[in-house]
Amino acid sequence: MENSTNNQYDNDSGNSEVDLMLTKKKKILKAVKLNPNISLKSIFQIGKKQHPTYLNAIKGLKEKNYKNAEHWCKEFLKTYPESYSMRCILAYTYTCLNNYEQAHLYLNEAIKLKEKKPTAWYIRGKIQFKQGNYNDAVKDLTTSIYYNANINNLYTILGISYYNNNNDEYALKTFNIMLKNDPNNYLCLKYCAYIYEKQGKFSDTLKKLKNLLSINEKDSLILCYHGEIL
């Protein structure tokens, strides 16, 4: 984000007012973080009648006891070695343990088993995003959407991936899809405001900033940004 912002203002680097504005915008975007507490139910189908070992794995995830979850995932795979869902859960567990190599291994196996199911594509796309591989993130996340994924923050991650690839038009389209379903999505609104400002669409920027202030009128960074645009 910072590189694209810096390029925009290279010619004005000697202007202290512009530098001050830029610093504030950087703070706004740095203050924005993806919600790590995405509901497990939005990713995995969790039923009450699932196998006890399966439920123990999910219990470990919910309690953030990831080593315990890893153990039960592997126990389940001993009994059901062709399980797509458990490979996805184990990969998700490894993601929580920051073991992306093992996560990729199980996700690739899951995709080979059931290529047209969206969950493995989504998790792999999210890992690519975390690792800064935004082109690969876009490919995996769009594939997940193609296979009818219905996951809370998918479009948000995809939009940020487009943004970090300097593809503002696709980023805006993606954020606006998310905003149709979740009009008060603070993260999407902030990115939209910043992109519109980069494009010189100040009236659209103000609309998004007003939306943000209607959600949280005490956000000092947004208040400063709003004042600068006015």
Image: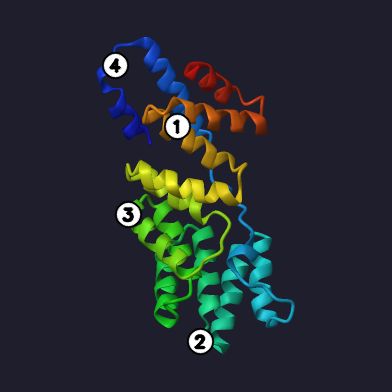
Q: What secondary structure is marked by label 4?
A: helix
Judging by the rendered image, the residue that carries numbered circle 4 is 12
For residue 44, which quarter of the picture? bottom right
Label drawn at residue 135: 3
Q: Nearer the viewer, residue 134 or 95?
A: 134
Instruction: Look at discs 2 and 4 and give the one toward the viewer.
Output: 4
Q: From the image, which quarter does the N terminus lie in?
A: top left
Instruction: Look at discs 3 and 2 and give the one toward the viewer.
Output: 3
Judging by the rendered image, the residue that carries numbered circle 1 is 194
The amino acid type found where label 2 is placed reads Pro
Residue 133 visible (yes or no): no
Find out whether the residues at labels 4 and 3 contact each other: C-beta distance under 8 Å: no
* Alpha-carbon span between mark 3 and mark 1: 21 Å
Label drawn at residue 73: none
Q: Residue at x 29, y 12 (%)?
A: 14
- Which of disc 2 and disc 1 is earlier in sequence? 2
Q: What secondary structure is marked by label 1?
A: helix
* Alpha-carbon span between mark 4 and mark 1: 18 Å
